[in-house]
Amino acid sequence: MSKGKKSRIALFASGSGSNFQAIAQSVQQGEIPASIAMLICDQPDAYVIKRAEQFQIPVFSFRAKDYPSKLEFEKEIVSKLREAGVDFIFLAGYMRLIGETLLNAYRGKIVNIHPSLLPAFPGKDAIGQAFNAQVKVTGVTVHFVDEGMDTGPIIDQESVKMAVDETRESLQEKIQGIEHELYPKVIKTLLTEAVMEGTKE
Ligand code: GAR
């Protein structure tokens, strides 16, 4: 990508989309030098779709079960992303493993946020896992995506102390508060400092 050109990014989400909202606001305020070309969502009823509509961001939503295989729906996603000129992908609560079709098309250009200090508590309900384990410290990780479940090189992390009277809900609130600050900040740094593969020109 040539210098000075704004990146076109896609956000992937499956649920409420509070991280989507934080990133979209940061883009709108001119803090992240990018435009959000598309939301990809695998749950057509998810609230994140309403948020995208409010920001007038195009949405591609699908149900995995309407396709014969992951290969087929990822082929369609890649073609939508190409059509929209997407350079980078940021997963924001997309609860699906990225398969080789997407990885091969966007290698080194897919980033995820996860609500624990990886490599601790990968997978689903990381906040609940940490809470049940009664760890004293947990947190948030932003990392590049590879074939694994919440593996891949770590870009940044922020920790959260578990209070003595912490509840599952209060922990979730703290973690999400951190996510909404950390993710836009990391995305800004990645896109501004040309750290992501293919941006060094
Ligand atoms: C976020 O906490 C995100 O870290 C997590 O899903 C939540 C989505 O919330 N992602 C994962 O657990 C990925 N393994 P949101 O829809 O309100 O942004």
Image (cartoon, rainbow, N blue to C red):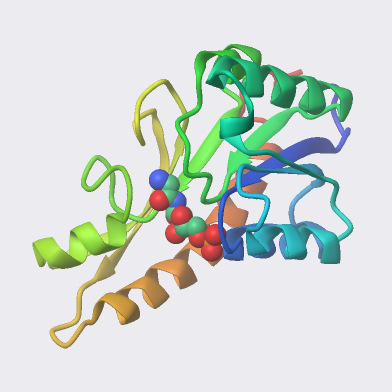
Can residue 162 be seen at all in this image of the molecule?
yes
Identify the image quadrant of residue 51: bottom right
Does 110 sit above or below residue 45? above
Query: Whole-percent x and y of residue 146?
Result: 44, 23
Query: Whole-percent x and y of residue 21?
Result: 68, 64
Does 44 sit above or below residue 196? below
- Residue drawn where x is 79% and y is 42% of the image: 38
- Residue drawn where x is 63% and y is 22% of the image: 74
* Left or right: 132 in relation to 24: left
26 vs 130, nearest the viewer = 130
Does 189 sit above or below residue 178? above
| Residue found at the very far bottom of the displayed protein | 165
Quick one: quadrant of the N terminus? top right
Query: Whole-percent x and y of residue 178?
Result: 45, 67
Quick one: quadrant of the C terminus? top right
Identify the image quadrant of residue 155: top left
Query: Whole-percent x and y of residue 110?
Result: 57, 30
Can residue 199 be seen at all in this image of the molecule?
no
Does 119 sit above or below residue 199? below
- Residue drawn where x is 48% and y is 72% of the image: 177
- Residue drawn where x is 41% and y is 76% of the image: 173
133 vs 135, nearest the viewer = 133
Count of labels in the image: 0
